[in-house]
Image (cartoon, rainbow, N blue to C red):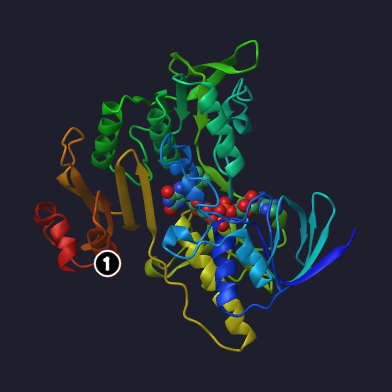
Amino acid sequence: MAEKSFKYVIVGGGVSAGYAAREFSKQGVKPGELAIISKEAVAPYERPALSKAYLFPQGTARLPGFHVCVGSGGERLLPEWYTEKGIELILSTEIVKADLASKTLVSAAGEVFKYQVLVIATGSTVIKLSDFGVQGADAKNILYLREIDDADKLVEVIKAKKSGKAVIVGGGYIGLELSAALRMNDIDVSMVYPEPWCMPRLFTAGIAAFYEGYYANKGVTIIKGTVAVGFTADANGEVKEVKLKDGRVLEADIVVVGVGGRPLTSLFKGQVEEEKGGIKTDAFFKTSVPDVYAVGDVATFPMKLYNEIRRVEHVDHARKSAEQAVKAIKASEEGKTIDEYDYLPFFYSRSFDLSWQFYGDNVGDAVLFGDSDAASPTHKFGSYWIKDGKVVGAFLEGGTPEENKAIAKVARVQPPVDNLDLLTKEGIGFASKI
Ligand code: FAD
């Protein structure tokens, strides 16, 4: 089979790939120099839309509406954009072998791709219940959500099971967003998770109490402190029941599982240094192998602000790490240097008519401020995290753009604070003064 050769290859066609392509174009990449090889059949898009507007009964988002880079307020990169720039989009092509020593990639169909510089942007894959051998987990209509094909399957099942029952397994942001989207489609929703409250990796008990109350008011049943241990199916092989560890059995026409992801690094195992489950990079997203960069979900990089090596699975970092890597690639060709990556963690989620943002680090003591009564029509609240006498993280539900900017600044500046009661009393006013 013919061999194709490019100066730059990005493997993976998700968020990072799209933002990297835009940066390559800004930096003057020449036609024919860059290729994106993606398992997906469509040009890079803003993945977060899949668990939000893609599933809404009204105002539904569909491609080409959410191709990158609209998510950060930029120009939408339609497939034609890549053609105009001479960037080759090699879609529906899964790379199954990578040999970093000979700078060669091989696809499932046996095509061979050569590169001079490789950007690894393979993102994450979902953890499946069948990975743990959960009984009956391969029944029909037990679904996961990572790529647009998964979202299409979900849309189809939502239509087929009108006014049916859904069980959402997992209490992270995917579980929360999917529960809301299904409820908005008039489906009877139960959420099941083992932890004492939802989003435990970020939310405090106080923050979670608001969302759990709000969801309950919207008709979502929340079942905590237990897990799904098995499923039964009907004669068509479609899921019918979810068996819980505590002995309860829930009826279900649809099950959606959101129990976490795993970075897709297996292609490069043993060829590149890894750390904390990801591919280890420097502050320019350069890996241990010359001419190989890793960005987005797969990269474990130095987080300058906290003087720590971390991996981040958020869209904002996917965008920014991709831009940083491309700038570094171009600078090194010209014998120049650029500033080190100095990332402020930013994560957000939206569901129903709620919207929150979080910046910084959720470590130390947390204080809750504002009106966090789920039944209050004027609810608006937030949290600060305080460590070593400094505010290091901030969360805000329902903030205005200015207020969100203010909490971002607080997390970056880390102002000292000695009176936590005062901080609670001042609330968002504290951030707005910084
Ligand atoms: P991805 O965007 O996942 O792209 C990876 C690409 O690589 C995919 O196209 C994949 O098919 C391709 N690929 C993988 N292996 C191969 C291979 N061997 N050969 C060819 N192609 C391959 N983050 C937030 O901050 N806020 C949110 O609200 C939010 N919502 C989300 C909702 C959903 C449903 C999901 C799944 C994620 C969400 N995220 C959110 C996380 C965010 O989308 C990711 O952090 C981001 O997409 C990571 O970008 P990436 O480029 O590293 O990986």
Q: Between residues 385 and 157, which one lies in front from this camera angle?
A: 157
> In the rendered image of this protein, does residue 213 appear above or below residue 49?
above
Left or right of residue 91: residue 126: left
User: Residue 184 sits in which quadrant?
Assistant: top left
Quadrant of residue 246 within the rendered picture: top left
Q: Is residue 77 visible?
A: yes
Relative depth, front residue between 205 and 97? 97
Vertical comparison of 309 with 107: above or below:
below
Q: What's the residue at 62%, 23% (across, down)?
A: 140
Is any part of residue 388 visible from this angle?
Answer: no
In this rendering, would 373 be left or right of 281?
left
Picture quarter with the C terminus:
bottom left
Is label 1 in a helix, a strand or a loop?
helix
Query: Is residue 218 rendered to the left or right of residue 299?
Result: left
Quarter location, residue 269: bottom right
For the point 41% across and 41% down, the residue is: 59
Q: Amino acid at mark 1?
A: Lys
Residue 271: image x %, image y %?
72, 62
Residue at left 38%, top 34%? Answer: 180
Q: Is residue 368 above or below residue 141?
A: below
Q: Residue furthest bottom?
A: 335
At x 30%, y 43%, the residue is 354
Rendered-image quadrant of the N terminus: bottom right
